């Protein structure tokens, strides 16, 4: 089998079919009562697995290059053949997440499996969180577990600060009237800016007595699951220099961006207890 697949990887068709390697392995183990070890070439469960952050980053960049270049030949670092040729999957069989993993592999998994394309700096921030959970639990994390960590830590957060309603007016600049809830107490506040998000940002800083800078904002459509949803990512820099990230997901892009800002401010407050 190894010889046949080596021939295949060099462009020589041996006339054998291994399109579903997991099934071949299962039948072999059942018939012989012998185990195919995890790192056995081609057949082992971990033969394609990359846990190292540097390996994952190289594979993720290679996969992205192939997508952008429409490459006719298989050429991805650390992967001799296309895992799909023998019935394996990238998400479960190649990019495996544990305490050794890096931001590249974690970001690639979120993007490919769930459509979440995190900004580069946010990937780094989230990567530390995922590795911390994996290290604490002493185990590999499955894709759904990684998504759950992201949602719990970054998405649509209203821990201390929330909003029940807001209205905008545009008279040269944007004005917003916000109904905030601050630790369960309602506050009606206003703000002004050169855009809707800027007006909300102004209202929060003026009325909560907080300060942050370097607001960075990116957005994209959620292409996995519901195409009608928008995803926004916001990073803010606290006075001490720490950057806090938040994510908002909603079917309206304005709501999505506001939820991302509230998530970032809540994460900053949870860490620094500002209000």
Image: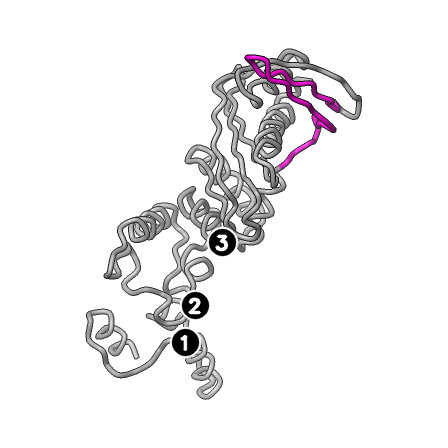
Q: Secondary structure at mark 1?
A: loop
**Residue at position x 21%, y 75% in the image:** 7
Q: Which mark is residue 113?
A: 3
Q: Tell me how far mark 3 sits from mark 2, CA to CA.
A: 20 Å
* Residue 264, above or below 241: below
Q: Are marks 1 and 2 in contact (CB under 8 Å)?
A: no
Q: Which residues are magenta?
A: 156-181
**Residue at position x 26%, y 78% in the image:** 4
Tell which circle, 3 or 1, labels the residue nearer the N-terminal end.
Answer: 1
Residue 165 lies within the magenta run? yes
**Residue at position x 37%, y 50% in the image:** 56
Q: Residue furthest right?
A: 185
Residue 40 on image: x %, y %: 36, 71
Foreground residue among 116 and 244: 116
Residue density around tag 1, few if under 14, some if 14–19, many if 20 or more, within 10 Å: few
The reply to whether residue 94 is in sight is yes
Q: Tell me how far mark 3 sits from mark 1, CA to CA.
A: 21 Å
Q: Secondary structure at mark 3?
A: helix
**Residue at position x 30%, y 49% in the image:** 68
Residue 91 on image: x %, y %: 45, 57
Residue 88 on image: x %, y %: 41, 67
- Residue where numbered disc 2 is placed: 45
- Residue where numbered disc 1 is placed: 20
């Amino acid at each position: 089998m190894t010889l046949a697949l080596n021939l295949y990887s060099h462009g020589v068709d041996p006339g054998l079919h291994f399109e579903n390697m997991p099934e071949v392995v299962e039948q072999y183990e059942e018939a012989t009562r012998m185990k195919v070890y995890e790192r056995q070439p081609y057949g082992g469960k971990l033969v394609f697995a990359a846990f190292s952050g540097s390996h994952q980053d190289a594979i993720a960049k290679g996969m992205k290059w192939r997508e952008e270049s429409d490459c006719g030949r298989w050429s991805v670092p650390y992967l001799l053949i296309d895992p799909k040729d023998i019935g394996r999957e990238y998400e479960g069989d190649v990019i495996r997440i544990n305490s050794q993993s890096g931001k590249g592999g974690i970001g690639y998994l979120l993007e490919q499996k769930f459509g979440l394309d995190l900004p580069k700096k946010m990937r780094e921030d989230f990567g530390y969180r995922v590795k911390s959970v994996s290290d604490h639990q002493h185990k590999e994390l499955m894709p759904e577990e990684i998504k759950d960590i992201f949602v719990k830590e970054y998405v649509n957060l209203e821990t201390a600060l929330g909003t029940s309603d807001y209205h905008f007016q545009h008279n040269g600049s944007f004005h917003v009237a916000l109904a905030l809830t601050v630790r369960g107490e309602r506050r009606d506040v206003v703000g002004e800016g050169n855009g809707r998000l800027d007006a909300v940002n102004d209202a929060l800083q003026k009325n909560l007595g907080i300060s942050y800078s370097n607001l960075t904002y990116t957005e994209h459509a959620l292409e996995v699951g519901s195409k009608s949803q928008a995803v926004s990512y916001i990073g803010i820099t606290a006075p001490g220099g720490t950057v806090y990230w938040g994510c908002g997901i909603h079917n309206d892009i304005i709501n999505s961006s506001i939820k991302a800002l509230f998530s970032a401010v809540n994460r900053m407050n949870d860490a620094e207890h500002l209000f």
